[in-house]
Image (cartoon, grey):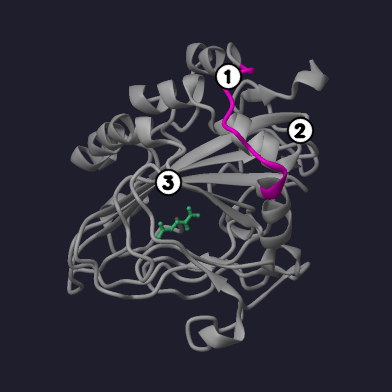
């Protein structure tokens, strides 16, 4: 996520912009097959800001692993690679994002999978735009927490309807899986983004934000929800829902693919400070709609046709 100074990879990116052909492929199929989303899923999503759909993307596990392997093999050939484990820390915590157009398996996922439809149904949106994808890999032996954070404060966007479709690519026990504070998306608060490598707050001069509560230190004070995940299970969560992990040591590899979507009312927002993706110089002003040439409409509700 936030780039650390400690690693040459974290200074690096290739062009994050999708080309026209990739965008067209995603736009061409706005009514893809849908998953069986129930009223219960929708109300849980609204109330808790997170919902689990076991097995929803089981058939996408192998292709998404292959795509992630491409990035792990040559991180600097991809956009925004980031290493968050220091030289003296065990294991590896790697992430990278904005590569969906560059990785064939990811492009196939956004063109053919029901991910955008799932996000649209849960958000009760009339249409869905693809913001980006984000991959995470924690290797065996890693004992590093993902700091508790919301995603929205990192982003150069704002809007009432948001959804990350987070797909486990390995079986993950609940003690090392991502956990969520149920209902925190409704608190009406934004918390300073945090560096993944060290956990420290940044952009602390942003007057719209405050420090996150100490969830790791006082877990019993919060309504924390987590799941034992099988590869292919998915968690859909709002960009404002607080989430993070313990620093429990990983016995096995733990990879994940997160597809970020936006619903009606989404717009560009140039927050002060460092942004993620750092799209600060793309000719947009705060309040502008996100250009469909870069952020394709990926699903439309039948009624909105
Ligand atoms: O997998 C993780 O540890 C972090 C995931 C996350 O923060 C996200 O998808 O927004």
Q: Is the residue 74 above or below the residue 153 in the image?
A: above
Q: Is residue 4 magenta?
A: no
Q: Secondary structure at mark 2?
A: loop
Whether residue 279 is situated above or below residue 301 in the rendered picture? below
Residue 233: which disc? 3
**Left or right placement of residue 222 versus residue 145 in this view:** right
Q: Give the residue pinned by disc 2.
A: 289
Q: Which residue is mark 1?
A: 32
Q: What residue do we see at 71% from left, 36% from top?
A: 284
The image quarter in which residue 97 lies: top left
Q: Position of residue 8 (x, y in %)?
A: 27, 54
Residue 6 x, y percent position in the rendering: 29, 65
> Do the CB atoms of the residues marked 1 and 3 lie less than 8 Å apart?
no
Q: In the image, which residues are magenta?
A: 30-40
Which residue is at a point 68% across and 33% down the rendered structure image?
283
Judge left or right: residue 232 versus residue 157.
left
Helix, strand or loop for the magenta stretch, by majority = loop
* Mark in the foreground, 1 or 2: 1
**Mark 1 vs mark 2: which is more N-terminal?**
1
Any magenta on residue 39?
yes
Q: Give the image quadrant in which the ligand numbered 1 is located.
A: bottom left
């Amino acid at each position: 996520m936030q780039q650390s100074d400690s690693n040459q990879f974290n200074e690096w990116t290739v062009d994050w912009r999708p080309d026209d052909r990739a965008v067209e492929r995603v736009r061409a199929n706005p009514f893809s097959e849908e998953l069986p989303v129930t009223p219960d899923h929708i109300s849980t999503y609204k109330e808790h800001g997170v919902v689990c759909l076991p097995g929803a993307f089981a058939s996408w596990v192998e292709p998404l692993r292959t795509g992630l392997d491409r990035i792990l093999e040559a991180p600097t050939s991809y956009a925004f690679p980031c290493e968050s484990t220091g030289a003296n820390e065990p294991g590896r915590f790697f992430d990278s994002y904005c590569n969906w157009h560059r990785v064939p398996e990811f492009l196939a996922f956004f063109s053919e999978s029901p991910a955008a439809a799932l996000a649209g149904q849960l958000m009760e949106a009339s249409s869905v735009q693809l913001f980006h994808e984000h991959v995470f890999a924690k290797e065996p032996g890693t004992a590093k927490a993902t700091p508790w954070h919301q995603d929205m404060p990192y982003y150069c966007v704002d809007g009432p309807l948001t959804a990350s479709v987070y797909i486990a690519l390995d079986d993950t026990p609940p003690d090392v899986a991502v956990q969520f504070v149920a209902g925190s998306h409704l608190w009406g608060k934004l918390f300073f983004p945090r560096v993944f490598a060290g956990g420290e707050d940044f952009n602390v001069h942003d007057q719209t934000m405050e420090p996150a509560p100490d969830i790791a230190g006082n877990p019993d004070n919060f309504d924390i929800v987590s799941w034992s995940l099988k590869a292919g299970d998915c968690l859909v969560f709002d960009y404002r829902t607080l989430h993070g992990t313990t620093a429990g040591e990983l016995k096995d590899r733990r990879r994940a693919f997160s597809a970020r979507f936006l619903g009606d009312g989404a717009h560009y927002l140039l927050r002060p400070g460092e942004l993620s993706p750092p799209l600060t110089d793309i000719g947009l002003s705060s309040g502008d709609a996100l250009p469909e040439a870069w952020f394709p409409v990926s699903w439309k509700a039948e009624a909105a046709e």
